[in-house]
Amino acid sequence: MCGLVAVISKNRNINLQNLVSMNDAIEHRGPNDEGYFFLNTADSQLDGKKAKFLEHDSISASIGFAHRRLSIQDLSDLGHQPMCYMDRYWIVYNGEVYNHIEIKEELEEKGYTFKSHSDTEVILAAYSEWGEDCVKKFNGMWAFLIFDTKDETVFVSRDRFGIKPLYYYESEESLVFASEIKSLMEYESIITEPCKSYCEDVIDSGSQEHIKQTAFENIYRFDFSSNAIIKLNDTKLSFSESRFWDYEVNLSNEKFCEKKAKEIADDYYELLKDAVRLRLRADVPFGSALSGGLDSTAIVYLIEEILKEQDSAYKQQTFSTVYDKKEDKECDESYYIKLITDKLGIKSNTIVPTEDEFLELHELVVKNLESPSAGTGMGGISTYTLIKNSDVVVTLDGQGADEQQAGYLYYISNYLFNIPLIEAIKQSLKLKSIPMAKTPIALGLSACLMRCVIGKKLSEKILSKVLKRDMSRFLIPLNELLKKESNSNLINLIHYSDSRSMLFSIESRMPFMDYRLVEFTAKIPACYKIHNGWTKYFARLAFDKRLPDEICWRKDKMGWPVPDKRWFNGPLNTFVNESIKQCPLVNSIKELELEKDIVTTYGVDSSVRLLNVSSWNKVFFGK
């Protein structure tokens, strides 16, 4: 939902044309409405739409807010932003607080009144009542700035997982915030260039959406799960983020208990169901992005169950990427998609990505993601082009489950290393039936044996030396690693989900990122996550007999794959080679063997990252 722009000026001089251009740059995030607010030198307030201000080049003001609205809750003009409450608080806000109805009821008991049905007004009232602590009550995704005209402060906050983006530029004279970097680049005083160290990290290690630095020098991410207060009367405009939320993980090595496993599965099911129920709150049509795996299928199932309980006549639709060529069979999940949609009687919409579509959309994807990524992004982009052609405005997606429930194969190593040797042998024999699991099993089991003989620290040191890589990540306790990855790799995927959906003015909601569910899952002992030959054991148990066995107890894992190996070695090879070899930024970072084929020499995964950095440099810096 929406996009925001905010300029805080120490010299009370805001370039109005720049602010309008910044807001126009994020029109795709909010095509339904726009608005502006200024506090000028006479302490009078001006607000309205851009036509009201376009005859001016600049405006004498200490605060300038601009907003683009994607109408989801309360489609009337009462949801217009920037919004004012109690003639004191002004807000620009991007996101959804799903439990706003419950918070509103609590505030009404305290005497607060409301004009609209929007969650925006509830946020303002909550801030009036609880101050900075209001965000601890919010279950949702958000990035917002609230200007308190009485105290002359600006409260800035970003949700627990950084689902909604917020970037900023800082100088002695001003602070500039926006939902997207391309919006910031419309402000004339912002000076930036490629951050070489960031781009090098992307090429070497993949996406870095979880860190403060961006791919642009002098432009930063506001920290997720953080707040800040900006005092306009301070001699210098500045702020420091403070983290408002964290969670504990269970590091016990307790023994598996069948009865407890069932209790965990039942509690998990009800909590996930409630997370889905909250995320169905919308005044616009909704649907689901369905991959065919356990996570997205579970959400589709729960939506149907909730609609039946509510006696709703609404018909859910699903949207999926599939492949129809024999050579792309390893990427196709259409069998599983059809299995669940036929079972539930749901309309299934599918699309087949092609290499021609890649060429057509590649630079658009790069421009939209804003930071070079580790993948092509075609699976998600194709799905959302399909959704754009429907009446659906909100989707519920399965992002986040694997990093919490131990869904990836490499988690097996961490699990085996940290449990008793006899149990590790027993579990290894069961796990070997999982396709492509032999390597993490071998690593985990051999490391476990070494640990029993020479100890944990020495084992890690020897393995790091022999394998010539840092083994610390592979040997820490499973739940510790899951939290670490939820604060790093998962943040990358969350960014992709938000940016690709908002490119098409669609809001992506993620039930697995309900903070209650995250806290609950983190406290589940590791033995209920990997057990008896299965990853994500407790989650599978929760949907046993509810979903078809072929999906619930499926051994293989895909995850929105694309046939980039065939594409990059075949029809896209010339494009990839020319793009990378002609990029001055890439060649200043890496000494590539330019006389050789890039894909063959460096592999498909590295070629994708090199291509993305090259294309990013071209899109944003014209090189």
Image: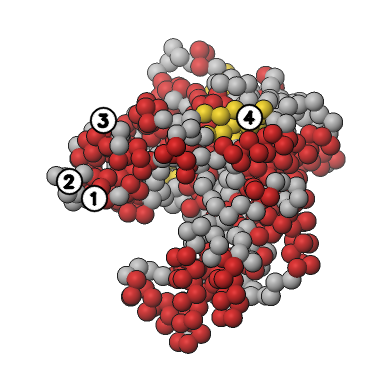
Alpha-carbon span between mark 1 and mark 4: 40 Å
The residue that label 3 is drawn on is 622
N-term-proximal mark, 1 vs 4: 4
The residue that label 1 is drawn on is 601
N-term-proximal mark, 1 vs 2: 2
The residue that label 2 is drawn on is 596
Instruction: State which mark lies toward you, 3 or 1.
Output: 1
Which labelled disc corresponds to residue 348? 4
**Mark 3 is on which residue type?**
Gly
N-term-proximal mark, 3 vs 1: 1
**Residue depicted at x 47% and y 41%:** 329
Query: Mark 1 near mark 2, Cβ–Cβ under 8 Å?
Result: yes
Q: Residues within 10 Å of mark 1 (few under 14, many from 20)?
A: few
**Mark 2 is on which residue type?**
Lys
Place of residue 559 in the rendered image (x, y in percent of width and height, measured from the top left): 52, 46
- Seen in the picture, residue 88 relative to 103 is either above or below; the reply is above
**Residue depicted at x 59% and y 28%:** 349
